[in-house]
Image (cartoon, rainbow, N blue to C red):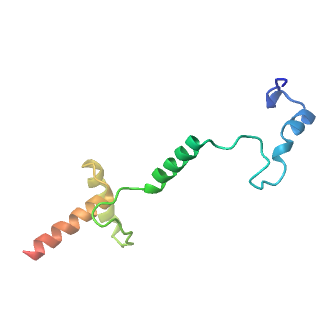
Amino acid sequence: MAKRAAYDEMTTAELAAATAAYDKPWTGRGLPGKPLTAAQRAQHRRAGARARAGRPKIGGGAQIVPVSIERGLLAQADAYAQRHHYKRSELVAEGLRLVMRRRAG
């Protein structure tokens, strides 16, 4: 097999000939390449399982809750969270726990 020139060094006609296989609609077949080996398929499955795992659950998992907070208070909370290396959601959760403990006693 003759060595091909780099795409940026080809003429328009050479480039069209070199990429003709990619001009056809993709049907899942027909593109150059080899099928995956059994080891590669297993690696692909493992990588997919890790990608779907997502963020680890704490307690019963997380629920997104839209809440309205006065802008000034939110700015103060964000500044506090940044200074103390909290995420906003961690700060809100800690605040809820403190209020509920205080009121339960």
Q: How many marks?
A: 0
The front one of 102 and 59 is: 59
Q: Quadrant of residue 37?
A: top right
- The percent position of residue 51, horizontal first and vertical second, equals 48, 52
Q: Would residue 40 appear left or right of 93 to someone viewing this image?
A: right
- The percent position of residue 71, horizontal first and vertical second, equals 35, 66
Q: Quadrant of residue 89?
A: bottom left
At horizontal 10% and vertical 76% (from top left) the residue drawn is 104
At horizontal 89% and vertical 37% (from top left) the residue drawn is 17
Q: Quadrant of residue 96?
A: bottom left
At horizontal 22% and vertical 62% (from top left) the residue drawn is 94
Q: Residue furthest top?
A: 3
The front one of 19 and 72 is: 19
The front one of 82 and 105 is: 105
Q: Would residue 36 appear left or right of 94 to someone viewing this image?
A: right
Q: Residue furthest right?
A: 13
Residue 104 in the image: above or below residue 46? below
Q: Would residue 61 appear left or right of 15 to someone viewing this image?
A: left
Q: Residue furthest bottom?
A: 104
At horizontal 32% and vertical 55% (from top left) the residue drawn is 87
Q: Residue furthest left?
A: 105
- The percent position of residue 76, horizontal first and vertical second, equals 28, 59
Q: Which image quarter is the C terminus in? A: bottom left
Q: Which image quarter is the N terminus in? A: top right
Residue 59 in the image: above or below residue 47? below
Residue 94 in the image: above or below residue 6? below
Q: Would residue 75 appear left or right of 27 to someone viewing this image?
A: left
